[in-house]
Image (cartoon, rainbow, N blue to C red):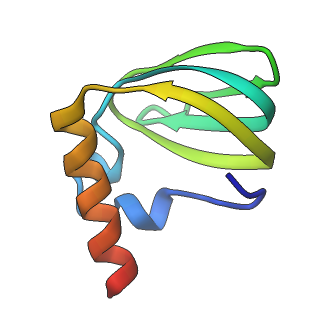
Amino acid sequence: LSAGVDTTPLFKGLEGDMCQCPHWGFVLSGQITTTDADGLQETVNANDLFYWPPGHNVKVNADAEIVMFSPQHEHSHVIDHMIEKVKG
């Protein structure tokens, strides 16, 4: 993931304008900050494990490489939505 990536505009139109899929993962390198519906932010760095519950946006602070596990059905819905946003 490249530094500067912000999912906020890509998630517009999803419930709460946020990703509603949970994610579990490990940060190999870089830094990422998530923001939830209440505005609570969590930053993960290289060698951190993470859990992002449904209802979040993501901003990549520094080029990042992650390994992430997500439920297929929920994640596919989010990815399809993002693809449609990019196509315009």
Q: Position of residue 18 (x, y in %)?
A: 35, 47
Q: Position of residue 22 (x, y in %)?
A: 35, 25
Residue placed at 30% from the left, 33% from the top?
Answer: 21
Count the numbered circles shown. Answer: 0
Q: Residue furthest bottom?
A: 88
User: Considering depth in this image, is 69 or 45 the residue closer to the camera?
Assistant: 69
Look at the picture and state if 82 lies above or below 64: below
Quarter holding the C terminus is: bottom left
Look at the picture and state if 12 lies above or below 55: below
Q: Place residue 85 in its image quadrant.
A: bottom left
Q: Position of residue 24 (x, y in %)?
A: 47, 18
Image position of 37 (left or right of 2): left
Residue placed at 28% from the left, 50% from the top?
Answer: 78
Q: Place residue 82 in its image quadrant.
A: bottom left
Image position of 79 (left or right of 30): left
Q: Place residue 19 in its image quadrant.
A: top left
Residue placed at 60% from the left, 58% from the top?
Answer: 6
